[in-house]
């Protein structure tokens, strides 16, 4: 079996039951002008036990399809958000 891809991102929504929305940011160069741009992708990830909260930096790994858009699972919380 191939190794599963693991990426880190920030939780931007935790309003669903057992699901979080994770925003992953990457930098790409514009093909004509060469300027670097920040691009953001959002993924729905399974959050069993609700350990990841809004603002946390989490690591997600790809898994079997759990719903139409949910194909990732939260493996660990890398950094907790600052509580105000």
Image (cartoon, helix red, strand yellow):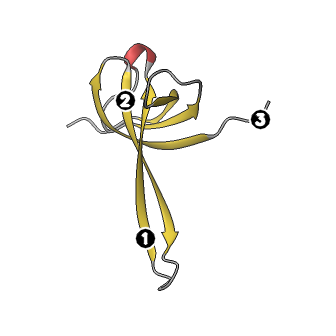
Relative height, residue 27 to residue 30 (above, below) = above
Which residue is nearer to you in this view: 16 or 51?
Answer: 16
Q: Residues within 10 Å of mark 2 (few under 14, many from 20)?
A: many
Horizontal placement of 71 versus 84: left or right? right
Which residue is nearer to you in this view: 56 or 60?
Answer: 60
Quote the CA–CA distance across marks 2 and 3.
25 Å
Horizontal placement of 8 versus 83: left or right? right
Q: Residue 54: percent from the left, percent from the top?
A: 30, 34
Residue 80 occupies which quadrant of the picture? top left
Quarter that holds the N terminus: top right
Residue 9 occupies which quadrant of the picture? top left
Q: Residue 59: percent from the left, percent from the top?
A: 52, 36
Quote the CA–CA distance across marks 3 and 1.
30 Å
Q: Residues within 10 Å of mark 1 (few under 14, many from 20)?
A: few
Residue at the location (25% across, 35% down)?
Answer: 83
Residue 2, numbered circle: 3
Count the labels in the image: 3
Read off the residue under disc 2.
20
Horizontal placement of 46 versus 64: left or right? left
Relative height, residue 40 to residue 33 (above, below) = above
Quarter that holds the C terminus: top left
* Contact flag, marks 2 and 3 (Cβ < 8 Å): no
- Secondary structure under tag 3 reads loop
Nearer to us: label 3 or label 1: 3
Q: Residue 32: percent from the left, percent from the top?
A: 50, 84
Residue at the location (59% across, 27% down)?
Answer: 63
Which residue is nearer to you in this view: 66 or 74?
Answer: 66
Mark 2 or 1, nearer chain start: 2
Mark 2 or 3, nearer chain start: 3
The outermost residue toward the left is 84
Residue 37, numbered circle: 1
């Amino acid at each position: 079996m191939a190794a599963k891809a693991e990426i880190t991102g920030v939780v931007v929504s935790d309003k669903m039951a057992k699901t979080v929305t994770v925003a992953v940011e990457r930098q790409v160069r514009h093909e004509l002008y060469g300027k670097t741009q920040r691009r953001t992708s959002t993924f729905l990830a399974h959050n069993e036990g609700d350990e990841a909260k809004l603002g946390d930096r989490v690591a997600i790994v790809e898994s079997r399809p759990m719903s139409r858009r949910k194909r990732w699972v939260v493996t660990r919380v890398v950094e907790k958000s600052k509580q105000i």
